[in-house]
Image (cartoon, grey):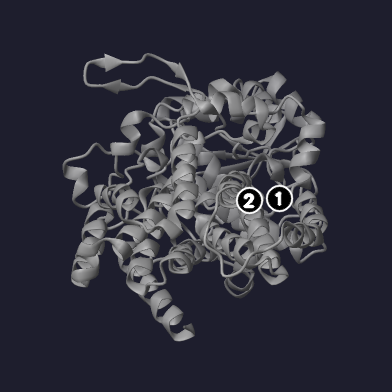
Amino acid sequence: MRRVLIYIFSLYTIISLLFFWPLALHAGNSVVDAGDPLFYAWNLVHNWQSFTHGFRHLLDTNIYFPTTNTLALSDTLFLQTALTAPILWISNNPVLAENIYILLTFPLAGLGMFLLARRITKQNLPSLLAGLFYAFSLPRLGQIAHLPMISSQWLPYLFYFLLRFLDDGKRANAFLFSIFFIANAASSVYLGIFASVGVLIVGGIALALPRQQKKSVNLNVYVKSVLLFVIPVITILIVLHFPYIRLKAEHPEIQRSLAEASARGAYQEDYTAVTKNTLFTGKILPTKEGERALYLTSTVIVLALLSWFVIPKKLRTIAIAFGGLAIISFLLSFGPERPFTVGPFDTGYIRMPYYYAYKLFPPLQIIRVPSRFSVLTALSLSLLAAMTLTYAKFFKKYPWVSLVTGMLFLLEVWQAPVRTVIVSSYRQAPPVYQWLKNQGGDGPIIELPIAAIETGSTPIEQQVEKHYDALTQNDPLATETYRVYFAGYHLKTTINGYSGYIPQSYHDAVIALDSFPSEYSISFLKQKRIDYIIVHSRQYDDKKWTSLREQLSQSRKLRLAVQFDQDFVYTITQ
């Protein structure tokens, strides 16, 4: 069996490398876009720096000065940092570490799904295809730019050990189930919530309905095993989520509203949409950006639906459990309310189960993007599809058809050469950041121009396709993601920043610096004890820069410290 697992993991790895070409070839200096991936690269290097210096400034990062506990404004990436630590240590290249991790999530997800499916079907080929269906499902592919959510490779292992534990009640399986529950929660708050929802549904149905077991397990055995690990697990989860606990205590007003969740829930048409890179179906199906592309493929949907007609009675409970998970996660993905149309019939906006779960299950108040629940739907359908491939007489009689089915699935999801953006490694950082890294002083810096990231006139999907040298004042989101990325290199504290939540300190800086270099703006910077003001002249339009440069030359409160081509560094005179 060990040799089989090695072969299967190798096969998934080869498919992943081909799937994500040329990203796999240029993993050290390319990202899929210049938005979130640059932020996560900084997050990894910040955590690594803190881990290796006694956890100093772990929560109070060097962005969004003077806001504290800024690590909790997005996913902490503790597990991802631990797993990429060897790459970070050897290369000091967080982009390389991030890309290798992303690429490895696909064979890991496939292998986990293989184990889960084989636990139920006892067959290698259907289980191998189930791993393919889940690992390369569009709800996963759409998250390739989101390091926390692409970490959904641990979900199949969670269910695998849950079913093993429910079958035999052994403490070893309870322990491994606990490990993978922690792995999901440590990878992302979202995945911790998804794991909880999945365990409640699958575990609850599996315990409530009769199912075939090798031996009868007394309820006391389950209770004793669970109690043995529940306190350590809770303790670890509290430690891992302390940043969020502290954030909630310091800022009780921070929570995701129903309106925000509704705006980012799935729409009916999202489940027929593919990414812009999808090779074939992109010609006949609508295309959407990232996590709006939730097409579950006709291959998997048809196979999953057929499972209800072919599975043996002994697996009916498992099928109901994962069928229930598929339906519930699908409904939750729509968020609090959605309209639906079927031909001429239009429901108008109706309240969805998420609306009521939001009030009854407080962790949902953390979720900003309910559409991500679709990853549980993809997992469940992949497992049901494996059951059809195993028990349908047609597939049993003609095994080669199963291979054709796998190829059809790949054709539905295959991506044309993945779009990438070249980024400078830390060894090739712009001269102004190289200079900044070698400067003393404990005061923060600020980089200009600065603006609210939602105000850019360039659409975000176009901003994140730009190289650093092509940025303008119309690209406020991309300028901040690049600045955060290089903050992991120069390590200076900065007022600038980017994350899943934008604190008030950033908005205050945007307002104050709108009139820079006015008396008010300089007074604001003096109060923050700014060491350096970095003005990126090429990011202004010609008219704005001409005016600004004249004002800077006339200001008696600012002194030009150094210039690097089109980057000007100023200090405030006393």
Image coords of residue 29 (percent x, y): 44, 62
- Pick the residue in front: 277 or 556: 277
Q: Is residue 331 above or below residue 403?
A: above
Q: CA distance from mark 2 to mark 1?
A: 6 Å
Provide the residue designation for mark 1: 492
Numbered label tally: 2
Q: Amino acid at mark 1?
A: Lys
Q: Quadrant of residue 572?
A: top right
Residue visible at 55% across and 33% down?
449
Which mark is first along the chain, 1 or 2?
Answer: 2
Secondary structure, mark 1, is loop
- Pick the residue in front: 536 or 108: 108
The answer to whether residue 502 is seen in the rendering is no
Provide the residue designation for mark 2: 487
Secondary structure, mark 2, is helix
Residue visible at 72% across and 46% down?
493
Residue visible at 44% across and 58% down?
315
Q: Quadrant of residue 3?
A: bottom left
Q: Amino acid at mark 2?
A: Ala
Residue visible at 42% across and 25% down?
543
Relative placement, left or right, of 442 versus 210 is right
How crowded pointer 2 is (Cα within 10 Å; few <14, some 14-19, many 20+) is rated as: many
Image coords of residue 498 (percent x, y): 59, 39
The label shown at residue 440 is none
Residue most toward the bottom? Answer: 3
Relative placement, left or right, of 508 versus 21 is right
Image coords of residue 125 (percent x, y): 32, 71
Q: Quarter of the image containing the C terminus?
A: top right
Q: Are marks 2 and 1 in contact (CB under 8 Å)?
A: yes
Image coords of residue 238 (percent x, y): 79, 49
The answer to whether residue 371 is seen in the rendering is yes
Q: Is residue 544 above or below residue 83?
A: above
